[in-house]
Amino acid sequence: MFEAAAATADLIRKQVPEAPEVALVLGSGLGALAEAVEQRVIMRYAELPGFPVPSVAGHGGNLILGRLGGRRVAVMQGRAHFYEHGRADGMNLALATLKALGCRRLILTNAAGSLNPDAGPGSLMLLRDHINFAGVSPLFGLAGNERFVNLVDAYDPVSCDRLAALAKRLGIPLAEGVYVWFCGPHFETPAEIRAARVLGGDAVGMSTVPEVIVARMLGLTVTAVSMITNLAAGLSDESLSHEHTMKHATAAAGDMQRLLSAFLEDLDD
Ligand code: HPA
């Protein structure tokens, strides 16, 4: 896995003036955030061996390098999902490549359903932990002791506290909670949502968890923020669909952009 990542990192390095220090993954409906990247160089995933070519509307399939919040960033506009091919390792090589390029941090965003009626559509939720309800790992098949990844504090608590403080300062409401990963692509049943609430979940979604696991194996510091696009199945009368997700994700993308830019500016490592 890592030799291939080193080769793709070399290929990228030749095309950009400066190596990135922070990697960002943009979820459904958040692709426009990439337009805020200054001095940007855009590469198609299809040209980058190991990067996933997305099949989901709203997932651009570009790697964008440049500056955001004064930081050198590599922005993944679109991600691989388990439900696209039944494998959880679709982001492994891309994340290993960004690590090989020099990234030490990873910021993940996604669209998610809320289990908490107080955090409704249009709100942001900072993730403090997760529950892997899909029951699979991006590390299946790897050898060596590195695969036994410790996931305590996987969502860096210091970064979480900083992000929460920044949101308060900027007047951006920011809920907090535990993300429950369901495999998708179907939405959950109301019974599954009731179960997820009993188990301690606050948001549900179809991504992010495999990326957190592989990023922690790579030693990246991880922060994740969900864009709440709906109340989860059975918690409201709204009918869930991908179109609904996209519409609501786009509506609150401005808050996400302001918050993440401020977070990048605030970093001191
Ligand atoms: N469930 C799973 N994934 C989602 C949802 C949801 O309710 N909303 C946006 N992504």
Image (tube, rainbow, N blue to C red):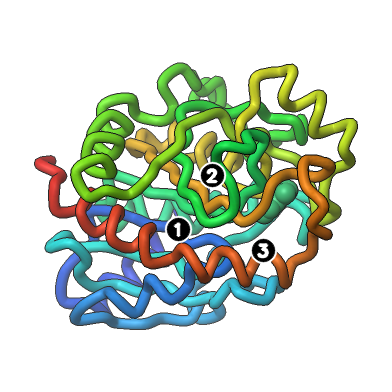
Question: Would you name the residue on which mark 3 appears?
Answer: 245
Disc 1 element: strand
User: Dot 3 surroundings within 10 Å: few (below 14), some, or many (20 or more)?
Assistant: many
Q: Amino acid at mark 1?
A: Val
User: Mark 2 and mark 1 in contact (Cβ < 8 Å)?
Assistant: yes
Q: Tell me, for residue 25, which label it has, or none.
A: 1
Occupied quadrant, residue 51: bottom right
Q: Amino acid at mark 3?
A: Thr
Q: Is residue 246 above or below residue 90?
A: below
User: Dot 2 surroundings within 10 Å: few (below 14), some, or many (20 or more)?
Assistant: many
Q: Tell me, for residue 163, which label it has, or none.
A: none
User: Dot 1 surroundings within 10 Å: few (below 14), some, or many (20 or more)?
Assistant: many
Identify the residue at horizontal 19%, vertical 43% (top origin).
169
In-image side of 82 versus 192 (left or right): left
- Image coords of residue 264 (percent x, y): 21, 52
- Viewer-closest of 34 and 138: 34
Sequence-wise, which precedes: disc 2 or disc 3?
2
Task: Inspect this view and state whether residue 85 appears.
Answer: no
- Image coords of residue 244 (percent x, y): 71, 67
Q: Is mark 1 within 8 Å of ligand 1?
A: no
Sequence-wise, which precedes: disc 1 or disc 2?
1
- Viewer-closest of 234 and 263: 234
Task: Inspect this view and state whether residue 82 appears.
Answer: yes
Question: Would you name the residue on which mark 2 appears?
Answer: 211
Q: CA distance from mark 2 to mark 3?
A: 21 Å
Identify the residue at horizontal 67%, vertical 35% (top origin).
115
Q: CA distance from mark 3 to mark 1?
A: 17 Å
